[in-house]
């Protein structure tokens, strides 16, 4: 016998597929020859210590795939630029072209937006960034 009054719904949750696949924000790439050279160098220097040789700077797991830095998992990149700071001669991270085509712009970092705001303010006053006595 069914009770009268309030009855709670029970809806089973299940993952829904994306209606539209959003492209990766960042395009991560490594210079493969330099990466291979660095791996060989580290393997020799650290005597094949697997833990050291296979440790990578990305905490988001971009290089955690089967082929590591040779085939980065671009969808995991958040654009923190740590890999570029640590290996500037090997890594390149840029905004992906397919993401740009969506018409979305990445927000600038805090220091960048501050610089833009200062520049806009100075343009309004007719002053330059180096001050009212600037000789430029
Ligand atoms: S930019 Fe940051 S998140 Fe992207 S691959 Fe480099 S370390 Fe990983």
Image: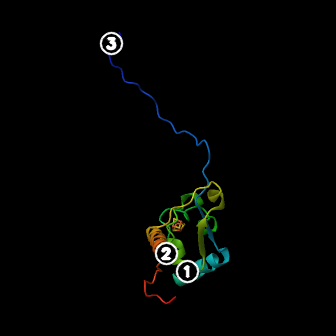
* Quadrant housing residue 30: bottom right
Please rate how many residues cluster around mark 1, counting C-alpha atoms within 10 Å: few if below 14, some from 14 to 19, many from 20: some
- Give the answer, above or below, for where 94 lies relative to 9: below
Query: For mark 3, what is the residue?
Result: 4
User: What residue sits 58% from the left and 56% below the top?
Assistant: 104
- The image shows residue 97, relative to residue 39, as above or below, that is above
Q: Nearer the viewer, mark 2 or mark 3?
A: 3
Q: Position of residue 51 (x, y in %)?
A: 48, 72
Q: Which residue is nearer to you in this view: 79 or 42?
A: 79
Contact (Cβ within 8 Å) of mark 2 with mark 1: yes
Disc 2 on helix, strand or loop?
helix
- Give the x, y percent position of residue 136: 52, 88
Is 2 left, or right, of 81 in this rendering? left
Circle nearer the N terminus (1, 3):
3
Label 2 neighbour load within 10 Å: few <14, some 14-19, many 20+: few
- Residue 114 placement (x, y as % from top left): 44, 70
Q: Is residue 12 above or below residue 72?
A: above
Disc on the earlier residue, 2 or 3: 3
Give me the residue at 43% from left, 84% from top: 132
What residue does disc 1 label? 42
Mark earlier in primary sequence (2, 1): 1
User: Which secondary structure lies at badge 3?
Assistant: loop
Residue 133 appears in the picture as rendered: yes
Judge by depth and name the residue closer to the eye, 57 or 92: 92
Instruction: Give the Cα separation between the discs numbered 1 and 3.
Output: 72 Å
User: Which quadrant: the N terminus?
Assistant: top left
The residue under label 2 is 52
User: Image point 49% across, 72% down: which residue?
Assistant: 82
- Mark 2 to mark 3 CA distance (whole Å): 66 Å
């Amino acid at each position: 016998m069914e009770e009268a009054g309030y009855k709670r719904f029970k809806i089973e949750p299940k993952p829904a597929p994306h209606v539209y696949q959003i492209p990766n924000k960042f395009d991560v790439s490594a210079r493969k020859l330099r990466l291979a050279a660095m791996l060989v160098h580290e393997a020799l220097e650290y005597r094949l210590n697997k833990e050291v040789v296979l440790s990578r700077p990305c905490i988001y797991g971009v290089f955690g795939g089967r082929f590591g830095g040779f085939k980065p998992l671009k969808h995991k990149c958040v654009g923190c630029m740590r890999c570029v700071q640590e290996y500037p001669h090997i890594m390149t991270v840029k905004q992906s072209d397919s993401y740009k085509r969506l018409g979305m712009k990445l927000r600038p970092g805090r220091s960048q937006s501050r610089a833009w705001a200062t520049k806009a303010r100075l343009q309004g006053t007719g002053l330059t960034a180096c001050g009212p006595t600037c000789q430029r």
